[in-house]
């Protein structure tokens, strides 16, 4: 399990990760996995993929970011391959959505909310895991952001789309993830990381992303790109 | 060479990999590489790529799955970069297909057969290599499946297609690979893995995939996805 | 920093990397990063991406090849995550191009020149870094080529294009990279690698690529692929 690995890897340097933090943390990882699995399964419905396509895309989205992060910090094999809880949760999520069978026209809203929740949770847990592997704060924050956006990039590339993180018709995406990761790295640096401060950082990132969506906060286009 | 690496890495824990198994194993890896290289080269012909496109796509398809597996189990640099036999075999396969110059209309059948053979062989050898790196049976089976489908996913993404493993117009693909990998992991767990049982598992996976193709075994679509 | 890592990793085996070589090397890496970042940002302009899309694509292109190389040689976390100079240079490059705001019609030439310079520099530095990690000459050359073409492949896949390295309407691309990498591996093998010979190899690779572009050196199509 992630938490076990954390303690083993990092020993006293994460002594602040007391059991309350650990439980919240594991819960956060699991909620992030389920959220991203749901987003992958809903993209599969939109793309008219079949049941197996739904399962494969749910797993790739939910586990992809964490696998990339684990490869980048040299933790092999990645947790997604050794702790099968996450894989099982992804498959169950895809199956549940298969049986609920949402109408394609109604997938957009839930998809974006699920994606935002996954983004917010993973930027926090990704940063904590990178930090506990002994990396400095800026590197940990970058890896946290990479974890958070990685799963969605994999989902979009596999389903033949330009990734959300690049598209100009999309509102701010990487910035909320970077914000949550940087806040987490700052909390860890100043020894203020607790269960509730971590949750707060995740909630802030989710809120940031959803506000960006609601009020269409865009980055500007290059001037002549409008030609 | 893979076999040498296996023995070095895993020592007595793969003592059941006697020399007969080793030879068969290496032969299996090589046949898998040639099959996937052929599938990559044939996709290149279908996509009207030139000679170098054929070579690059053949190498990416044939070596991609094994490189991903080696990264996931922490074996760096991957065997594909240190044992140049596999790279050479991929290049030769692409060159041979260049000179045979199959008509684009006739590439579909051979492409699917080559892909199925690669899939069946790699799910077995991938599982054995993961197992010999000391991973448990479920993790080894997952890595075996990943090895088997990884090369094809890379081939399809590079050539601008939605991967076969996701497409609803495609018949069962990941399931035969998972079946072969799980069978191999079971054989290894019960100490029944021999040259011939491994070949049997590979043949069963190839047969499963080709039957799925022949009789169009599909996964069901999500109900409302049919709207 | 790369150079520091090199010396630490490889000790006396890179004693030929004296301080002149080191300085040139670091300069070469940085110029390669800036060139590839520019190519990513220019593709973003062509694709009408917004400011953040430009930054993300610039970073992915500039850092992607090196990250892949570091994963393949087992250097984790990759230098791009620990030495933030490269990331900063990529972001600054994207910002500068945003404010220059080139017309979309004028991006093609600069894009190809920037890409060629990145290709030539990275095939040399990639090979040297792989060699200093203790790999043999052929493996180092392959990794150097992979480093050089990796960033461009990531850029093209993310922006929804078939990679340049595969496209038949493109002129020789992987071959100049392989040429530069093989030349560098040969220089290292014969203990002739100096600051100026390395620069010469990079310049030869850049020149090779630009000549291929200018005179449209194509690989042949498979015969029946023309049907």
Image: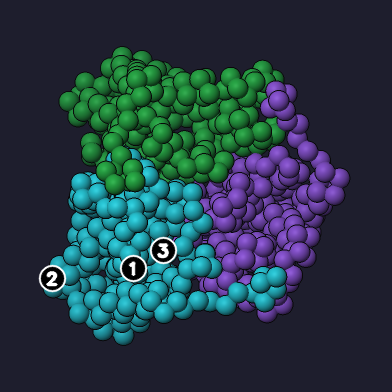
Chain colours: A purple, B cyan, C green
- Few, some or many C-alpha atoms within 10 Å of disc 2 (few <14, some 14-19, many ≥20)? few
Locate the N terminus of chain A by quadrant: bottom right
Question: What residue sits right under mark 2 in the picture?
Answer: B19
**In-front residue for pair A42/B124:** A42
Question: What residue sits right under mark 1 in the picture?
Answer: B116
* Up-down relation of residue B176 to residue C218 (above or below): below
Q: Residue furthest left?
A: B19
User: What chain does mark 2 sit on?
Assistant: B
Say whether residue C52 is visible: yes
> Where does the image place residue B121, in percent across and percent down from the top left?
29, 68
Say whether residue B78 is visible: no
Q: Residue at x 18, y 73 (%)?
A: B21
* Up-down relation of residue C215 to residue B109 (above or below): above
Mark earlier in primary sequence (1, 2): 2
Which numbered mark, 2 or 3, is in the foreground of this view?
3
Q: Quadrant of residue C203?
A: top left
User: What chain does mark 3 sit on?
Assistant: B
Mark earlier in primary sequence (2, 3): 2
């Amino acid at each position: 399990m992630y938490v076990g690995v954390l303690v083993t890897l990092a020993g006293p340097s994460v002594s602040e990760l007391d059991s309350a933090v650990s439980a919240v943390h594991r819960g956060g990882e699991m909620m992030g996995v389920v959220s991203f699995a749901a987003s992958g399964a809903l993209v599969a419905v939109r793309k008219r993929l079949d049941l197996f396509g739904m399962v494969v895309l749910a797993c790739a989205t939910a586990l992809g970011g964490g696998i990339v992060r684990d490869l980048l910090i040299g933790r092999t094999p990645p947790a997604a391959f050794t702790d099968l809880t996450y894989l099982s949760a992804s498959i169950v999520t895809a199956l549940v959505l298969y049986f609920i069978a949402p109408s394609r026209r109604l997938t957009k809203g839930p998809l974006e909310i699920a994606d935002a929740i996954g983004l917010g949770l993973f930027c926090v847990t990704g940063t904590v895991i990178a930090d506990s592997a002994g990396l400095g704060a800026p590197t940990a924050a970058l890896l946290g952001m990479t974890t958070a956006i990685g799963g969605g990039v994999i989902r979009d590339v596999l389903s033949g789309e330009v990734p959300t993180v690049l598209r100009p018709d999309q509102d701010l995406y990487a910035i909320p993830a970077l914000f949550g990761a940087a806040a987490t790295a700052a909390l860890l640096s100043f020894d203020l990381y607790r269960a509730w401060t971590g949750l707060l950082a995740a909630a802030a990132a989710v809120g940031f992303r959803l506000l960006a969506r609601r009020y269409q906060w865009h980055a500007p286009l290059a001037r002549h790109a409008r030609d």
